[in-house]
Amino acid sequence: MSTIRINNFKVELSNLDKVLWPKQGYTKGDLINYYIDIYPLIQDFLAQRPLSLKSYPDGINGKSFFQKNAPDYAPHWLSTYGIYSRHRKEAINWITVNKLADLVWVANRASIELHSWFSTINKPDEPSFAVFDLDPGDRSRFKDVIDIALVIKKIIDEMKLIAFLKTSGKSGLHIYIPIKTGYKFTASKIFLKSIAEMVIRVKPGLATIEWRKKKRDGKVYIDYRQNGRGKTLPVPYSIRPTANATISTPLNWDELNPKLSPEKFTLANIANRLKKKGDLWSDILQIKQSLPSYLL
């Protein structure tokens, strides 16, 4: 056990040499160091947003577990916020990463992935983004995911909206459309479903919005249902529990080509990519867009 101070907050660290990624040999110390380095780029996607934790105490090949409630033994300075759960009929004391010390404490729990809400604690029913999660089916390729993403981009462009793109860190793509305050999740979901249905009319053999996996016929799943209170996706630059420590990486739209593979963006090369490309999502939260009224 060792202790570090971050802006006067004392954070206890343990088992820093514990290997979490056996193939690459990355340790919990590597995880903590990465999130310290990347924090300036992700802090706005974490601050005031409830965080679902998924911990891998024995590494990515061991058992993992989700946790929403902050544990009783959490330090007194850890940022938390109680929100009543209609489903559980009780309050959940959510962790919110509002400072670097919070993030280091989370990473020390071997919480590899950072899954935060699309809304903040101040307006939990009003999302900051409308989000598509594109997931390949068992008979589709990543190239098909790219094709669907480009059709979505064309539709969004025709609506004079701006959309941001990132890899999921696994086999899919995420498309984020920043929106202004005031829309409920219901409105964003109606908007996204309308676009998804347009895509299916254009690419009926490639895409589906069928949520039951066995009925998707192996097509690319356009998931808009993740847009709801309490739903989450990995934040940009979140590491994923994959063999090569892939990262959910922001992309330029012109990077979508047949040679693109989400597996190429990893802990080993993310620093070099940032030096070359910069932070492609630096201004997403400053963009406040209205949704087309004719789709709501």
Image (spheres, grey):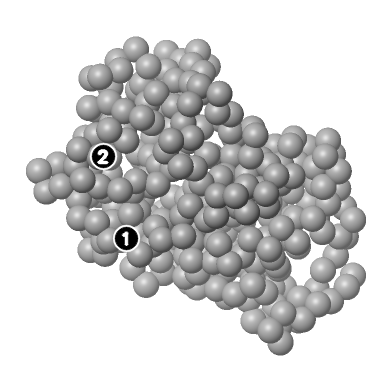
Amino acid identity at mark 2: Ile
**From the viewer's perspective, is residue 162 above or below residue 95?**
above
Q: Where is mark 1, residue-wise?
A: 287
Distance between the alpha carbons at the discs numbered 2 and 1 = 15 Å
Assign the N terminus to one quadrant of the image: bottom right
Q: Does the rendering let one see residue 187?
A: yes
In the depicted view, which residue is nearer to us: 116 or 263?
263
The disc, 2 or 1, on the residue closer to the chain's N-terminal end is 2
Residue ID at (48%, 35%): 255
Which element is circle 1 on? loop
Q: Where is mark 2, residue-wise?
A: 156
Quadrant of the rendered image containing residue 51: bottom right
Report the residue that reaches farthest toward the left. 294
Checking the image for residue 243, the label placed there is none
Residue ID at (87%, 52%): 18
The x and y percentages for residue 70 are: 61, 67
